[in-house]
Amino acid sequence: MPLVKRTIEPRHLCHTVLPRAIKNELECVTNVSLANVIRQLSSLSKYAEDLFGELFNEAHSFSFRVNSLQERVDRLSISVTQLDPKEEEREYHTPCFTYLNLKRSSSLL
């Protein structure tokens, strides 16, 4: 079941109790209905503004993350171009693995 985040008010446009002194009921119902339509449009406008604000914040956050990733890619591409392809391959180990290898080689001596 979806959670309702926004509700547009008033929900019922024409539900109203007319006073007995009203001579022209149609005109009264029409005026009340039009006033409620204007209230609904106002509510819809408010929610549209909130929605576009949220979209703007999400787009700004996304843009910040993309720029950060682009900077990282640029730094990596510079590092890769500075590597010497003729240099022999080196083995890269974790510090723990390197420590164990040093300990093992010293114990063999």
Image: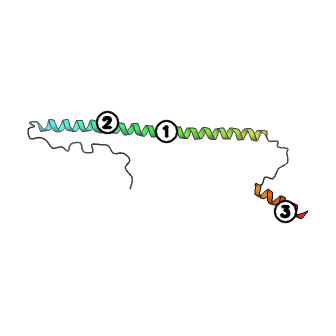
Instruction: Say which residue label 2 marks.
Output: 42
Mark nearer the N terminus (3 vs 1): 1
| Direction from residue 81 to residue 39 in the image, left or right | left
Of the two numbered discs 3 and 1 in the rendering, the one whose residue sits closer to the viewer: 3
Instruction: Say which residue label 1 marks.
Output: 57
**Residue 40 spot, x, y in % from top left:** 29, 39
Neighbour tally class for label 1: few under 14, some 14-19, many 20 plus, Cα within 10 Å = few
| Spatial separation of the CA atoms under disc 3 and disc 1 | 55 Å
- Dot 1 falls on a residue whose secondary structure is helix
| Residue at 42 percent of width and 40 percent of height | 51
| Spatial separation of the CA atoms under disc 1 and disc 2 | 23 Å
| Residue at 21 percent of width and 42 percent of height | 14
| Spatial separation of the CA atoms under disc 3 and disc 2 | 77 Å
- Dot 2 falls on a residue whose secondary structure is helix
**Residue 78 spot, x, y in % from top left:** 73, 38
Neighbour tally class for label 2: few under 14, some 14-19, many 20 plus, Cα within 10 Å = some
| Direction from residue 57 to residue 3 in the image, left or right | left
Residue at the farthest right position: 109
Quadrant that contains the N terminus = bottom left
Instruction: Say which residue label 3 marks.
Output: 104
In front: 68, or 12?
A: 68
Neighbour tally class for label 3: few under 14, some 14-19, many 20 plus, Cα within 10 Å = few
**Residue 41 spot, x, y in % from top left:** 31, 37
Mark nearer the N terminus (3 vs 2): 2
The amino acid at mark 2 is Ser
